[in-house]
Amino acid sequence: MAHIINLTTRSDKRGNLTVIEKEIPFAIKRIFYIYGVDDSERGGHRHKETVQAAICIHGSCIVSNNNGKVKEDFLLDHPNKCLILEREDYHTMHHFTPDAVLLVLASTPFDAADYIYEPYHD
């Protein structure tokens, strides 16, 4: 089930430093980011194998999630808020602010055969 983890952030008068590598619960095999999104919806899939971590490092967006049992919306609006998406989590990303940059860390390299585009039926 999708869930939020708070990334360790160290702050002082010089600014903030957020650490990722020891807090993500999987080995990172792929990194990508999404930005410049209009009013479109992104995502619309789940995975056979891949687990993901989504961090909106600038601006904000909403991730709507359905794991086949529970539907939930997550507001990603701070760079230390990380959403873990399990492979069964059918997710869409939407309501991006114009300045939003959504960083995604994945447990596997890209493989088109890993994607399941069929949503869960209610």
Image: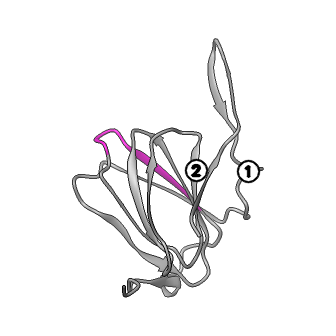
Type of amino acid at the residue the image marks with label 1:
Glu
Would residue 83 be found to the left or right of residue 25 on screen?
left
Would residue 45 be found to the left or right of residue 17 on screen?
left
Query: Callout 2: 10 Å neighbours few (<14), some, many (20+)?
Result: many
The residue pinned by badge 1 equals: 23
Q: Residue at x 45, y 64 (%)?
A: 72
Task: State the image quarter where residue 92 is shown.
Answer: bottom left
Image height check: is 103 above or below 42?
above
Image height check: is 51 above or below 47?
above
86 vs 66, nearest the viewer: 66
The quarter of the picture where the C terminus appears is: bottom left
- Mark 2, secondary structure of its residue: strand
80 vs 36, nearest the viewer: 80
Would residue 66 be found to the left or right of residue 36 on screen?
right
Q: Which mark is residue 44?
A: none
Image height check: is 58 above or below 5?
above
Q: Residue at x 63, y 73 (%)?
A: 108
Type of amino acid at the residue the image marks with label 2:
Cys
Q: Residue furthest right?
A: 22
Q: Residue at x 37, y 43 (%)?
A: 100
Where residue 38 appears, x then y in whole percent? Answer: 23, 52
**Magenta-colored span:** 97-105
The residue pinned by badge 2 equals: 82
Residue 101 is one of the magenta-drawn residues:
yes
Q: Residue furthest top?
A: 13
